[in-house]
Image (spheres, rainbow, N blue to C red):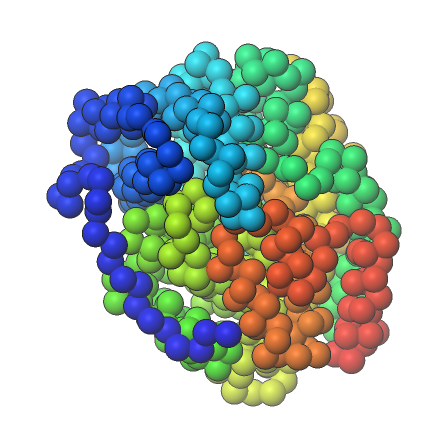
C-alpha cells in the first residue's frame, strides 16, 4: 500500500503542441482528420494511435470541465455561461461524428485483437457499445439536453431565504434545521418549502422539455423508451432492470425498518409525541448543534489531518489541490447547488466543489468528495484517458468508503467525546437512510421513462405512490402536502444526469462491506481500497469489487446480511 504521496509528474504532450488551447472547432478538426486517416500497420502503431487519441481526449475533456466548473462556481456570470454554451453547441456536437468514425476504425482494425485483453476488455466493450448506440440525429438533441440540464443549476443557484434579516442560500439555511429551537426550525423549513414551490412550475416545464428530448433520443437509437436506452449508454453490463427492482424491494424490507428505528430514537430524544418534517435532523433543546468548523479553510485543514491519519497519501492529494487552487468549498449566492469532485484528465489534479455552511453534513461531503479525489490521483498514470473513465459504481465506492473509514478520526473536528459519538451516529444514520431515498428516486425514474408523455398531475401522483412505499410514515406532513408532492425537484440528478442514482445505492452497500472489512483489518482494507481505485476501468465491476476485497452484490440476501451487521452496531451506539 502506498503511504507516501508523490506529486504527479507533468506529462509533456507528444501529439498536440504544448501551447495548444481549445478555441474553436476549426483548430481541432485537423487532429481528428489525421487520426481517422492514419495508417495502422501493426500493434505498435495501433497503440501509438490510441495514445494520441488519449492525449487529444484529455486536453478536450479538461477544457470542457473547466468551462463547467467556472459556470457552477458563478451561475450569474454571462461570460462563463457563454463559454460553456459555446462548447456544448459549437464544439462537442461536431466532435461526435468523428468520435464515431474513430470507434469504427478501432473495432475494424485487425490488430485490435492483439491488445492485452486483461486490460483492454472493458474499454473495447465500451467502444463497441458506443458505436452501436451512435446516431447522427441524436447529436443536436444531446447538445440541447446538456444546455437545458444546466438551467437547473441556474434556477436552484438563485434560490435563497431570509432568516432574522439575513439572506441564506438553500444549503446555508439547512443548518437551522439542526437547531434545538423547534419554532425556528419550523419557520425556516416553511420558508425553504415556500421558496422551492415558487419555482415549481418553471422546473416542471424544464423537466418536460428534457423528458421529450430524452425520449426522442431513445427512439432514434431504436429503443422503446429512454430507460432501456440509458441502461445501455451507461454501460450497465453487470446488472439488469430486474436487479434494480430486487434492490428496491430488499431496501424496503430490510433497510426501511432500520430507518424507522433511527427516527423513533430521535423522536424519543426530542421528547416529541409527533414528529414533523423539521424534526428529522434536530437535536434536543439542551444540545448544542454540531459545529465542526467555522469556514472553508478550517474544513480543508481538518480534513487533511483526518486523511493523514488514515494514510499520508490521502492528505497529499488534498494538499496538492489546495496549492493549485482546486477547492471551492463555501456556499454563497449565485453558486450552483450540490457538491462534486471533477477529474481533470490532463493534469490529473481534480477540482472539489461544494456548498459548506459549517454543518456536519459538510464534513461528510468533504470526506466523500475527498474519496473521489484520491481515486483521480491513484488512476492518473493509467495508459489511456479512457481507462480513467471508471463507472460510477466504483467511483461512489471510493467516496462512500472514505466517509466510513474516516469516522474514527473525527475527533479532529469534535474534541468532546459525546459530540464525536453524535457525529459518528449521524454518519451511520445517513448511510442507512439514504438507501430508501435512492430506491425512491431510482424507482421513480423507471416510471418516468417507461411512461413517456405523462402529465404533470400523473407524475405527481406516481411520485407520491413511490415516496409512500419507501417512507416510514412516522413524520406528519400536514400543511406541507404540496411541498412533499414536489420534493423530487430537489434531486439534481433527475435534471442533470438521468438514471445516475442507483449507483449510490450499490456503492453504499459496497462501502458498508468495506467498513466491515476495515473494522477487522484496517491495513488490509486500505490496501485493497487503493489497489481497486488504482485499476480505473481496466477491469469489470465485479473484478474491481473483488480487488477491493468485497462482493459486487445487491441481492436481497446480501442486503439482509449487511442490515443484520448494522443492527448491533446501532445498539452499541444507544439506538434502542
Q: Residue at x 15, y 45 (%)?
A: 18
Q: Residue furthest front?
A: 42
Q: Residue at x 84, y 58 (%)?
A: 560
Q: Residue furthest left?
A: 19
Q: Nearer the viewer, residue 294 or 410?
A: 410
Residue 480 appearing in the image: no
Q: Residue furthest bottom?
A: 416
Locate residue 4 relative to residue 481 in the image: left or right.
Answer: left
Q: Nearer the viewer, residue 132 or 487?
A: 132
Name the image quarter holding the C terminus.
Answer: bottom right
Q: Position of residue 436 (x, y in %)?
A: 73, 50
Locate residue 522 relative to residue 371 in the image: left or right.
Answer: right
Quarter holding residue 186: bottom right
Q: Vertical placement of 543 versus 113: above or below?
A: below
Q: Nearer the viewer, residue 318 or 457?
A: 318
Q: Position of residue 472 (x, y in %)?
A: 81, 52
Q: Residue at x 78, y 68 (%)?
A: 566
Q: In the rendered picture of this protein, how many numbered marks are placed on residues?
A: 0
Q: Residue at x 77, y 75 (%)?
A: 569
Q: Nearer the viewer, residue 423 or 185?
A: 423
Quarter holding residue 462: top right
Q: Position of residue 295 (x, y in %)?
A: 37, 69
Quarter holding residue 85: top left
Q: Vertical placement of 454 versus 202: above or below?
A: above
Q: Position of residue 198 (x, y in %)?
A: 51, 34
Residue 372 appearing in the image: yes
Q: Vertical placement of 267 versus 54: above or below?
A: below
Locate residue 59 relative to residue 401 in the image: left or right.
Answer: left
Locate residue 437 relative to residue 497 in the image: left or right.
Answer: right
Amino acid at each position: 500500500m502506498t503511504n507516501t504521496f508523490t506529486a504527479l509528474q507533468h506529462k509533456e504532450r507528444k501529439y498536440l503542441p504544448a501551447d495548444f488551447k481549445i478555441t474553436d472547432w476549426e483548430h481541432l478538426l485537423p487532429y481528428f482528420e489525421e487520426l481517422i486517416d492514419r495508417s495502422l500497420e501493426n500493434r505498435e502503431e495501433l497503440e501509438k494511435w490510441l495514445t494520441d487519441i488519449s492525449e487529444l481526449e484529455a486536453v478536450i475533456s479538461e477544457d470542457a470541465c473547466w468551462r463547467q466548473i467556472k459556470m457552477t462556481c458563478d451561475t450569474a456570470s454571462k461570460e462563463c455561461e457563454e463559454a460553456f454554451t459555446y462548447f456544448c453547441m459549437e464544439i462537442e456536437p461536431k466532435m461526435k461524428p468523428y468520435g464515431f468514425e474513430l470507434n469504427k476504425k478501432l473495432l475494424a482494425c485487425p490488430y485490435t485483437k492483439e491488445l492485452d485483453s486483461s486490460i483492454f476488455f472493458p474499454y473495447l466493450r465500451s467502444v463497441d457499445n458506443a458505436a452501436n448506440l451512435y446516431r447522427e440525429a441524436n447529436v443536436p438533441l444531446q447538445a440541447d439536453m446538456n444546455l437545458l440540464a444546466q438551467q437547473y443549476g441556474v434556477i436552484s443557484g438563485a434560490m435563497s431565504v431570509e432568516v432574522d434579516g439575513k439572506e441564506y442560500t438553500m444549503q446555508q439555511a439547512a443548518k437551522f434545521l439542526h437547531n434545538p429551537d423547534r419554532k425556528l426550525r419550523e419557520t425556516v423549513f416553511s420558508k425553504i418549502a415556500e421558496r422551492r414551490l415558487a419555482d415549481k412550475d418553471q422546473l416542471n416545464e424544464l423537466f418536460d422539455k428534457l423528458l421529450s428530448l430524452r425520449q426522442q433520443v431513445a427512439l432514434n437509437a431504436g429503443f422503446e423508451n429512454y430507460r432501456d436506452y440509458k441502461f445501455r449508454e451507461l454501460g450497465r453490463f453487470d446488472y439488469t432492470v430486474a436487479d434494480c427492482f430486487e434492490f428496491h424491494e430488499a431496501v424496503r424490507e430490510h433497510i426501511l425498518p432500520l430507518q424507522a428505528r433511527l427516527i423513533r430514537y430521535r423522536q424519543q430524544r426530542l421528547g416529541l409525541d409527533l414528529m414533523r418534517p423539521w424534526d428529522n435532523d434536530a437535536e434536543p433543546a439542551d444540545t448544542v448543534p454540531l459545529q465542526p468548523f467555522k469556514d472553508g479553510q478550517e474544513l480543508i485543514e481538518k480534513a487533511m489531518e483526518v486523511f493523514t491519519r488514515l494514510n499520508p497519501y490521502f492528505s497529499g492529494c488534498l494538499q496538492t489541490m489546495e496549492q493549485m487552487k482546486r477547492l471551492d468549498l463555501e456556499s454563497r449566492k449565485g453558486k450552483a447547488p450540490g457538491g462534486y469532485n471533477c477529474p481533470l484528465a490532463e493534469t490529473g489534479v481534480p477540482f472539489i466543489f461544494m456548498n459548506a455552511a459549517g454543518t456536519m453534513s459538510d464534513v461528510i461531503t468533504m470526506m466523500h468528495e475527498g474519496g473521489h479525489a484520491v481515486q483521480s490521483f491513484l488512476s492518473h498514470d493509467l495508459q489511456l484517458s479512457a481507462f480513467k473513465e471508471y463507472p460510477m459504481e466504483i467511483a461512489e465506492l471510493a467516496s462512500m468508503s472514505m466517509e466510513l473509514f474516516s469516522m474514527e478520526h473525527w475527533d479532529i473536528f469534535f474534541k468532546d467525546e459525546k459530540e464525536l459519538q453524535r457525529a459518528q451516529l449521524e454518519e451511520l444514520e445517513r448511510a442507512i437512510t439514504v438507501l430508501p431515498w435512492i430506491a425512491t428516486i431510482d424507482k421513480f425514474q423507471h416510471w418516468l421513462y417507461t411512461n413517456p408523455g405523462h402529465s404533470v398531475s400523473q407524475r405527481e401522483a406516481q411520485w407520491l405512490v413511490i415516496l409512500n412505499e419507501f417512507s416510514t410514515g412516522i413524520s406528519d406532513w400536514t400543511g406541507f402536502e404540496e411541498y412533499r408532492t414536489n420534493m423530487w425537484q430537489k434531486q439534481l440528478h433527475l435534471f442533470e444526469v438521468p438514471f445516475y442514482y442507483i449507483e449510490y445505492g450499490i456503492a453504499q452497500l459496497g462501502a458498508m462491506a468495506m467498513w466491515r472489512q476495515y473494522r477487522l483489518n484496517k491495513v488490509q482494507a486500505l490496501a485493497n481500497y487503493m489497489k481497486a481505485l488504482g485499476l480505473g476501468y481496466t477491469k469489470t465491476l465485479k473484478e474491481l469489487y473483488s480487488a477491493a476485497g468485497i462482493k459486487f452484490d445487491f441481492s436481497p440476501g446480501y442486503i439482509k446480511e449487511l442490515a443484520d451487521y448494522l443492527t448491533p452496531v446501532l445498539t452499541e451506539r444507544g439506538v434502542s
